[in-house]
Amino acid sequence: GQNIDQPTEMTATEGAIVQINCTYQTSGFNGLFWYQQHAGEAPTFLSYNVLDGLEEKGRFSSFLSRSKGYSYLLLKELQMKDSASYLCAPRRGSYIPTFGRGTSLIVHP
Amino acid sequence: DTEVTQTPKHLVMGMTNKKSLKCEQHMGHRAMYWYKQKAKKPPELMFVYSYEKLSINESVPSRFSPECPNSSLLNLHLHALQPEDSALYLCASRQGALSGYTFGSGTRLTVV
């Protein structure tokens, strides 16, 4: 397997910043996806990192360290609608990405 | 059109029924996928079609039978399912290996 590890649940306050970490097995690593999934809905694509570093896309940024087998998703200026599950999905070689169990983020006023 | 459309949205079926789930996309994506997702779990890959050919079957029981009639359509035929097969069934497509998946809104299946 991919040994994907991310926290089960996180809580944060509206307007704050939250970082969701993900670690994974590095052998054959070839890129990592982040998805957002609201309860009862389909996952939506947030980001794809293949090189080390931070990629910023509006309020959301994603970071990757290939050597450490580590990624994080950074959410700024949190809004209530950001309450959702965030899925880390690394891929190995040309294989299909494998989804982590997801981090349930609860944003409260 | 930037969507993946799945029908029906909800389906309740008995263990002796035969039903089909449908998925359609008109984005020209040549890879299409079926995923199964149980509550509070991540999506689990079932099947992959690439250029209308089945390329991956993740050891799915034969009571699930996929079909790709053309590059825009993907079906999942269901027969003699078990209650534990109740789940959200997601269809997805993508343009290439470096692209993110576009998911449909899913079919919520309940087997009684």
Image: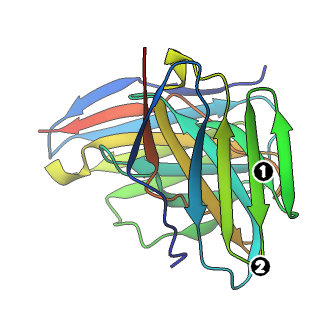
SS state under label 1: strand
Residue B24: x %, y % from top left: 64, 31
SS state under label 2: loop
Residue density around tag 1, few if under 14, some if 14–19, many if 20 or more, within 10 Å: many
Of the residues under marks 2 and 1, which one precedes in the sequence? Answer: 1
Q: Nearer the viewer, residue B28 or A101?
A: A101
Q: What is the number of the mark on residue A67?
A: 2
Three-letter amino acid code of the residue under disc 1: Tyr
Residue B29: x %, y % from top left: 80, 42
* Mark 2 chain: A
Vertical arrangement, residue B59 with respect to residue B54, above or below: below
Q: Are marks 2 and 1 on the same chain?
A: yes
Residue that carries the numbered disc 1 in the rendered image: A48
Q: Mark 2 vs mark 1: give the one in front.
A: 2
Q: Is residue B70 visible?
A: no
Residue A33: x %, y % from top left: 69, 53
* Side of B71 where B5 appears, left or right: left
Vertical arrangement, residue A101 with respect to residue B92, above or below: below
* Side of B87 where A10 appears, left or right: right
Vertical arrangement, residue A41 with respect to residue B77, above or below: above
Three-letter amino acid code of the residue under disc 2: Ser
The Cα atoms of the two marked residues, 2 and 1, are separated by 17 Å
When asked about the image quadrant of residue B28, the answer is top right
Residue A73: x %, y % from top left: 66, 46
Q: Nearer the viewer, residue A101 or A52?
A: A52
When asked about the image quadrant of residue B70, the answer is top right
Q: What is the number of the mark on residue B7?
A: none
Q: Nearer the viewer, residue A77 or A97?
A: A77
